[in-house]
Amino acid sequence: MKDILRINSIAEVHKFFGLEKPKHPLISVLRVTNELQKKDLEKFKYALGLYQISLKESCAYTISNYGRNQYDFEEGSMIFMAPHQVVEVEKQNIPTNSGSWSIVFHPDLIRKSELGKKIDKYSFFDYASHEALHLSNDERNTLSAIATTIEQEFTQQIDMHSQTLIISNLELLLNYCIRFYDRQFYTRTNLNQDLVSKFETLLKDYYALNKQEELGIPTVQYCGAALNMSPKYLSDLLKKETGSSTQDHIHKFIIEKAKYNLLNSTVSASEIAYNLGFEYPQYFSKIFKKKTALSPNAFRQSYN
């Protein structure tokens, strides 16, 4: 097994790549240069204790062990990594005139800010690598301009306004990425609708094969793995297409099965809960009431 190099500070990033000392202790913008190109990244495996936002402009290289799939990180693509995700670079071939860049920043940079409170809403940090954001030229230029603004803020003389401006531009960049991911979801509507259909079939097959007897009710993680997607990406995609998250879809599907069983059998609500894969009937009753405004027994009685 390859050793994983763990890098936990901006200073360690610069030292590893042989760069001059960072201008700011908590953030840096790394650009492809002769120095970076000399570094042999073949078969290199690392985990940063930092957030990383990377844009690749030309010449593909391959990333694996990030998410579940190998991914050809191609021209005009962006990937996002939260702290401590493990990445393996299989090969590297980046020209020195590339416009590629990576923003790396320490969680402490945003910890006490509004961005720090809501960083988890940017769910693409938890997407698998093959769910990268693919950008048009205009989108690339927009994000690269913001990266340059961020870089200018910490390379010029730092003052009392610098951190606020750096963080606000980081948030601006992330908000643009939300917009561009929405565009990507929209332009792939046919593929997405096919996936919605596969997801519905997956739930039907789950119960047809009685998997709930061994695994319990279907989970978001199970569905994502079965459809070769990260749980966050699947949920975001379903929400864009249907207005409901993966968890909502699972619950709706289970409640419909429960309604049928309540109205077409004399089996107790608790037994129905167990048959559907619930470990605790109380949890089943809670979900049922949330979705129908009635308890399972009240629902059954309302049809008598």
Image (spheres, grey):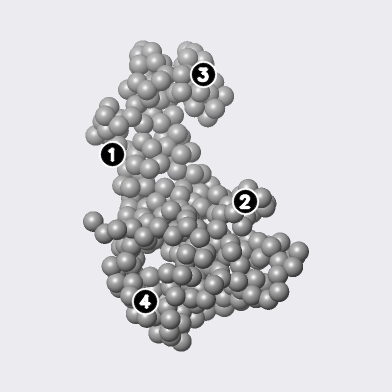
Q: Is residue 118 left or right of residue 201?
A: right
| N-term mark: 1 or 4 | 4
Q: Is residue 228 left or right of residue 209?
A: right
| N-term mark: 2 or 4 | 4
- Is any part of residue 195 visible from this angle? no
Q: Amino acid at mark 2?
A: Arg
- Is any part of residue 129 visible from this angle? yes
Q: Which mark is residue 111?
A: 2
Marks 3 & 1, CB-CB < 8 Å contact? no
Marks 3 & 4, CB-CB < 8 Å contact? no
* Disc 1, SS: helix
Residue 100 placement (x, y as % from top left): 47, 77
Q: On the image, numbered disc 3 is attached to which residue?
A: 295
- Of discs 2 and 3, which sits in the foreground? 2
Q: On the image, numbered disc 4 is attached to which residue?
A: 39
**Location of the N terminus (image quadrant):** bottom left
